[in-house]
Image (tube, rainbow, N blue to C red):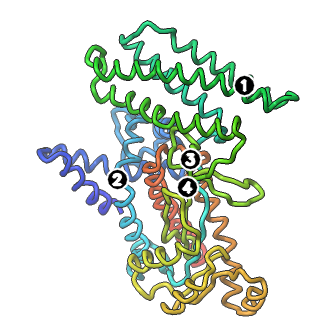
Amino acid sequence: MEKSFVEQCLPCYDQQFRDATPKARARHQRHSYRALRCDVLRGLLGEDYRGMSRRLAECPLFRWFCGLEELVAVRVPGKSTLQDYAHWLPAESMRPLITQLILTAHQPTGASALELARSIELETVWLDTTCLKTHIHFPVDWVLLGDAVRTLMKSTRLIRAHGLKQRREPPETFLKAMNRLSIAMTHARRTKDSKKQRKKILRLMKQQIKVVAGHARRHRELLDSQWNQTDWTRAQAEAVLRRMDGVLALLPQAQKQAHERIIGERRVDNADKVLSLYETDTRVMVRGKAGGEVEFGNTLLLAEQKDGVIVDWQLHRASAPVDARQLSERLQQMEAAYGAGVIRALGTDRGFSSAANQTLLKSKGIYNGICPKNPARLRERMGEERFAQLQQRRSQTEGRIGIFKNVFMGRPLRAKGFAHREMAVSWQVLTHNLWVLARLEQKQEMALVA
């Protein structure tokens, strides 16, 4: 794994730094080795970047594992370096490495090299989907307006602190005014004329937003034209400009959404909703579960084999199609990775049930373990011993998803932006599979000794 990981990282570095010296290339390979081990360990420990840096400084065993042994002094990567390690390799480059690990464990010679008593099988696969929640507050319409004021005024205050000022009231004044309106909006729900009061407060918020947006745009233009008068580089100024541009671009839509829902008392389609000013790829998912009727995030599909190794995954940026329409694509992806004819049986819940999927599995010679939607048909199929075993085992896939989301991905998921969340999913699939294979090895050794 380490050799393949470093080989994947080196071409990207050579493309970015064409005149790199051999010493620089060797240093990059050393950091690639550390990036792999640090990210796997961080996934096992469930730490954030700062906490991981502290754990490395405290524990000699962790430093040994990550290749940070030094006799002279304890030197560990800081939180910024660990964050760079988490983004060391793009998500599309991680998939071949994970596929290589699974194929190695699947082949008898590879399983022997991994010190497994037996190779893992890929004949039977279970699929399920879930919601990978984004780290946002509940998307209340008027709260989004408060978020916009806070971001724009903090950016404005930052620009003014670096020497670019206009004759305006301090940003703190607008923040305090918006906080008072937010508190009033919260308490208005308890009054007798709550609808009238909420409409009145929202109109005041819209007036405040108009002033704040104009104030922010002027400071934004000032920074764009006179950034060289500050102590910032152009790249640092661009970071502030992007932050303000993102909020200013979504602000009119957020205002319209709040107006439609509170003043107009009209519904807004999910496709037209602004759920977050920062995580713009968040989707509404109506799950209908007891713990949450509606969830906000992205659809994540996971496929596992008998021992719990995740053999396929996909995180959807846009609104995902229904489960039944995803089966054909994922089956094609698994056959391309592990070979046609390797998968011989497939089990899912009733969300994947469709006539097209039944025809697809039959044409490929794969046993159909999909739970039917028709209760009478389900009772009939439960009489088949193999189908009943697949459906009984399917309950463990729910637990696998819970372990992956809450333990490995973290609760809440700290990765910001869809690209980083997709990268985090790939890293944690790798960490999870290494963890599962290590546990298989221990169980098999104990069984052999007994």
Q: Nearer the viewer, mark 4 or mark 1?
A: 1
Q: Which residue is mark 2?
A: 89
Calculate the distance from the C-alpha at mark 3 to the C-alpha at mark 4: 12 Å
Q: Earlier in the sequence, mark 3 or mark 2?
A: 2
What amino acid is labelled 3 in the image? Answer: Leu
> Where residue 206 sits in the image (x, y, percent)?
60, 26
User: Residue at (62%, 59%) from the top-left corner?
Assistant: 403
Q: Nearer the viewer, mark 4 or mark 2?
A: 4
> Where residue 38 sits in the image (x, y, percent)?
42, 48
User: Residue at (63%, 84%) from the top-left corner?
Assistant: 369
What amino acid is labelled 1 in the image? Answer: Lys
Residue farthest to the right?
192
Query: Is there a contact, CB below 8 Å, between mark 2 and mark 1?
Result: no
Where disc 3 sits, the SS reads: loop
Q: Is residue 305 above or below residue 220?
A: below
Where disc 1 sits, the SS reads: helix
Calculate the distance from the C-alpha at mark 2 to the C-alpha at mark 1: 51 Å
Q: Which residue is mark 3?
A: 413
Where disc 4 sits, the SS reads: strand
Q: Which residue is mark 1?
A: 200
Q: Which residue is mark 4?
A: 298
